[in-house]
Structure formats: structure tokens, C-alpha cells
């Protein structure tokens, strides 16, 4: 690699730090950046800095936001009585893309994981309780992941909320749409059978 | 995609302009950058700008360089009588990695391509002739690609150099090492047979 001048090597090294980008890809991207227009590279460079400077957490739901209160929290058309609890901002984006949800969100920014030293005080559970105590919310949809940690977090929150006058639901588990049953794992099939519904 | 704040969307858009990076990957990289340390993002941002500011063409061989004359051209241990002509800086890097070449380079920064309006005056052929006229070079190795345009460029340069007192050679074509003959295309096999050597 030392056949390139130092500034290109430096760029390759920095790009290769990104996840899923190997040295070969980093080399290709660095050479593209070198040949791209000055305007394009300046925009790329500036947008990297800007994202660190501008993006903060929404003070209500802890989603990523350019302003104090995010767009969803400040949208008067969203159902204020419905609250969906997710692990990460990306999960919120996935649910928004589905178009099936019109309520508000609460992003935990983490998941309970005693093995990694993440307890209830390390994720936004206290803030969730505070929001519920304000009294507007009627239903909390627990949409944490369906892995061990996500299930444990959902169970923990459900237990906490039992003392509050709010309905608590969990997203359904089952066979994914378009799924071929013979490729679906046993635990999922068991869940799908248990949760079968009359048609 | 519009579920992210504007500065993240802007970063995703700029990253997705890079070759081979789709919107999904750009989203993943943007979220990584968002969560990376300030130092790491600042270094990435700065190295992108630096590469445009610092890198220029070596005034002798037209390789990418941080200084007026590149490292290879200013290296006294390299053979000054041997000159390898390649299309792009990346080709030079590939040959350097092989470790089989100790001479100097001339990077055309392009290839003859009448279909795309690239003629002899658009690539560094005139500068190549000037270097050869200086008299030090005894052999020119034509290492342009083995596709139609690379072959045409090599043939054109070979014809030009016939009038100059310099030996001209072309890199060998044949079956790649580790290649299984049944997967090698017919043109390559034909070349390999034509260029067979006594053992």
C-alpha cells in the first residue's frame, strides 16, 4: 500500500475504519474521491462534520434529531395516546417505513444486557415512566427485538408498567411474510403456532 | 428515508454518491459516523479534503504524488534506463506490489479511445516522447491493459517509438497463474499458445 503518497494512504486508512469496508474498497473509494469534483468532496467532508455537530437526541423521545424536539414528536397529526418503545433509532425508521404506525415513539437507545453491564439505568426507561405518568398515553407497544435481550427488556418494562394505568402490548412474532415454512427456525414456528388466530 | 433528520439524510446522500455504495450501505455508514468518536470523524473529514489539496501529478511520470517529483522518480536506486508505460496510477501500484520491476514509470492517465473522444493529445503521449528524447531510456515496457483500447494504445505508442532509438516491449499475455485451463477464455488460450516458450 505504501506506493501511494501519504495523503492518499491516510485517506485509505480512515475509510477502512468504517464497518464493512476493507482495504481494497477503501482504496477504490479514495481514488474516486481523488478524482471527484472539488464541490463533491467538500460536501462529503462537510456533511461528515455536520452530522456530529447538528444531530442530538430529541428531548422527548430520544430519537435522532436536528432540533430539540424531533419531527414526529412535534407533529400534531400523530396519535399522542399511542407510544411505541424501540431499542434504536434505526428500529424507529424501520417501523416508519412500514407505514403501519401513526403514534409516537420512545427510543431506549440500548437494551438490557447484564452480560455487557447494561442495566435499567443505562437505557431510557426512567424517562419512559415519566412520559407515561404524564397521563396522555393509553397504550404502550413494546417493539424491542425478538432476541433474548429484546424479549427480556420487553418483559422488564411490561412488569414495571403493570403498576401504571396503561395498556401494554408486544409486537407479534411469527413466520415472516413471503417465508417458506421449511426454512423457518423451530422457535419462530412454535411462536407462530401458539399465536394462531381464527380466520 | 425522510425519517432521519436533514443532516443525516444529507450525509447518506453524499456517501451514496461513492461508487459501489448503495443507499442501505450509506445509511449504515452514516449511522456509524454519527456514533464514532469526534476525533475519528474529524480525521476522516479532514483527510478527504487533504487528498484533494495535496495530491498532484508528478511532473516527470504523472503518477499521483504529494510533491512535485514522486518518490519513485526521485529514488536514485531505480533503474533510469527502463521505463514502464501504464494507463492509470492504480496500474503502477499493482506492478509495484508484484515486486518484479525496478525501473521508472510513465502514467498516461488514460487510454486511446476514439469512441469516447480520447485521442493521442488527451493522454500523456507527447510527454512520453519528450522523456525518451532525453536519451537515458533504453527500454520502454508497454503495460497498458490487454483489452481492445489498451492493445490499440500500446500498438500506437510502439509505432511512434519505432522512429526513436529505444527498445520497445509489451507485457506477456497468457493463462493467469493458478488458472484452470478449462475456465480460460479462447482468446487468452490462443495468445498463450502463440507465445509458448521452450522449457
Image (cartoon, coloured by chain):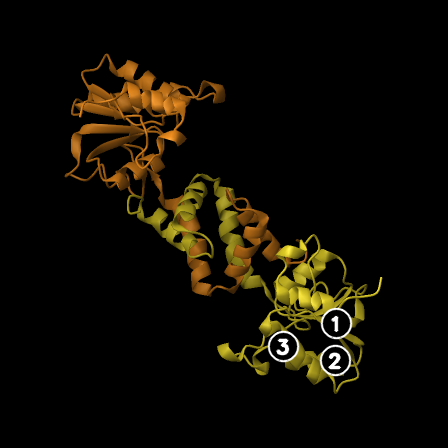
Chain colours: A yellow, B orange
Q: Which mark is residue A153?
A: 3
Question: Disc 1 designates what residue?
Answer: A83
- The image quadrant of residue A161 is bottom right
Image spot of residue A68 (x, y percent): 66, 69
**Which of the chains bears the disc numbered 3?**
A
SS of the residue at dot 2? helix
User: Separation of disc 2 and disc 1 at Cα?
Assistant: 9 Å
Q: Is there a contact, CB below 8 Å, between mark 2 and mark 1? A: yes
Nearest-to-viewer mark from 3 and 2: 3
- Residue at 32% across / 21% down in the picture? B191
Specify the farthest residue to the right. Answer: A199
Image spot of residue A77 (x, y percent): 81, 63
Note whether B6 is above or below B95 in the view shown.
below
Image spot of residue A189 (x, y percent): 67, 64
User: Separation of disc 3 and disc 2 at Cα?
Assistant: 17 Å
Question: Disc 2 designates what residue?
Answer: A132
Image spot of residue B15 (x, y percent): 53, 49
Q: Is there a contact, CB below 8 Å, between mark 3 and mark 2? A: no
Specify the farthest residue to the top. Answer: B163
Q: Is residue B6 left or right of residue B109?
A: right
Q: Is residue A79 left or right of residue A66?
A: right
User: Separation of disc 1 and disc 3 at Cα?
Assistant: 16 Å
Q: Mark 3 packing: few (<14 Cα in 10 Å), some, or many (20+)?
A: many
Amino acid at each position: 500500500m505504501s506506493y501511494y503518497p501519504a495523503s492518499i494512504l491516510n485517506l485509505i486508512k480512515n475509510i477502512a475504519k468504517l464497518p464493512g469496508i476493507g482495504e481494497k474498497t477503501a482504496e477504490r473509494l479514495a481514488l474516486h474521491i481523488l478524482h471527484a469534483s472539488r464541490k463533491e468532496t467538500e460536501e462529503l467532508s462537510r456533511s461528515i462534520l455536520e452530522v456530529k455537530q447538528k444531530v442530538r437526541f430529541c428531548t422527548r423521545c430520544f430519537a435522532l434529531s436536528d432540533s430539540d424536539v424531533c419531527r414526529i414528536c412535534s407533529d400534531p397529526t400523530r396519535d399522542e395516546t399511542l407510544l411505541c418503545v424501540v431499542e434504536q433509532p434505526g428500529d424507529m425508521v424501520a417501523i416508519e417505513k412500514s407505514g403501519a404506525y401513526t403514534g409516537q415513539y420512545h427510543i431506549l437507545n440500548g437494551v438490557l444486557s447484564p452480560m455487557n453491564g447494561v442495566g435499567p439505568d443505562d437505557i431510557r426507561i426512567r424517562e419512559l415512566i415519566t412520559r407515561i405518568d404524564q397521563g396522555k398515553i393509553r397504550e404502550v407497544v413494546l417493539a424491542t427485538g425478538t432476541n433474548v435481550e429484546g424479549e427480556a427488556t420487553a418483559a422488564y418494562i411490561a412488569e414495571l408498567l403493570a403498576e401504571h394505568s396503561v395498556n401494554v402490548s408486544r409486537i407479534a412474532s411469527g413466520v415472516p411474510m413471503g417465508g417458506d415454512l421449511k426454512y423457518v427456525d423451530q422457535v419462530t414456528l412454535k411462536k407462530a403456532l401458539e399465536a394462531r388466530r381464527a380466520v
